């Protein structure tokens, strides 16, 4: 762990604190993450942690945003490498979504810890809108739907993805089954819309 005597730039200190917060959540769940536990684990004074995050919800929101940035970057990278056919685009998006659900269990824990927080609800809507736009943009070349109709189908697919992710996290389906189901739902949705 870094000691308080180590001088880091503000952005570097924030990254160090978020890395430490992530490690606490992995080891002890979100109940183990407080501003005090973070300060102790990071080897810094409490005022440094308060200066960066203000409150525990502020810390959890920063952690949630960081997880979203990582998920979005992984999705964008996977899309760059995907073959330019609708089923492959849908499969890549599906795989990226479920990788987030399985490879970042902290995401679900942090989200659950912030339920009922109005600021968090607004941020979740903002991030969902961003991911919906990413999905619609990736699928746009393969759909005859209007932009609005395609976006609405993407909203529906993401709702289905959340329900399928819950099944995946309960061990009721495999990752491959989850990816196949969401891929089929997505492709079927844009195909049906293009034909109609």
Image: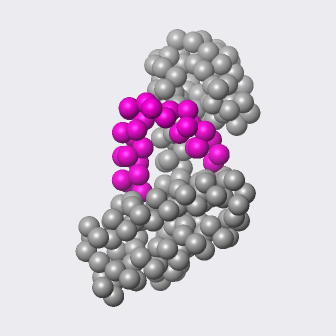
Percent x, y of residue 12: 54, 31
Q: Position of residue 83 (x, y in %)?
A: 52, 80
Please indicate whether residue 106 sits to the left or right of residue 9 in the image. right
Residue drawn 71% across the image and 61% down it: 172
Residue at x-position 46% and y-position 60% = 158
The part of the image, by quadrant, that contains residue 163 is: bottom right
Residue 66 on image: x %, y %: 51, 41
Q: Residue furthest bottom?
A: 195
Q: In this orientation, which residue lies closer to the viewer: 65 or 192?
A: 192
| Left or right position of 69 against 170 | left
Would residue 71 be seen by someone viewing this image from the given angle? Answer: yes
99 up-or-down from 16: above or below: below
Q: Which residues are magenta?
A: 104-131
Q: Residue at x 64, y 26 (%)?
A: 31
> Magenta span has 57?
no
Instruction: Point out the image quarter for the N terminus.
Output: top right
């Amino acid at each position: 762990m870094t000691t308080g005597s180590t001088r880091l730039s503000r952005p570097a200190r924030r990254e160090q604190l978020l890395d430490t917060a992530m490690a606490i959540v992995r080891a002890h769940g979100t109940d183990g993450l407080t501003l005090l536990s973070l300060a102790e684990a990071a080897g810094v004074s409490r005022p440094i942690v308060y200066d960066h995050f203000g409150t525990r919800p502020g810390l959890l929101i920063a952690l949630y945003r960081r997880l979203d940035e990582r998920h979005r970057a992984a999705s964008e990278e996977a899309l760059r490498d995907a073959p330019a056919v609708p089923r492959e685009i849908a499969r890549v998006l599906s795989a990226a979504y479920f990788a987030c659900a399985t490879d970042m269990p902290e995401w679900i824990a942090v989200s659950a810890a912030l339920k009922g927080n109005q600021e968090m609800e607004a941020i979740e809507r903002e991030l969902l809108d961003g991911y919906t736009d990413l999905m619609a943009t990736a699928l746009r070349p393969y759909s005859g739907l209007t932009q609005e109709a395609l976006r609405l189908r993407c909203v529906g697919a993401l709702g289905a993805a959340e329900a399928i992710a819950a099944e995946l996290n309960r061990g009721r389906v495999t990752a491959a089954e989850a990816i196949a189901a969401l891929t089929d739902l997505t492709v079927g949705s844009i195909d049906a819309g293009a034909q109609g």
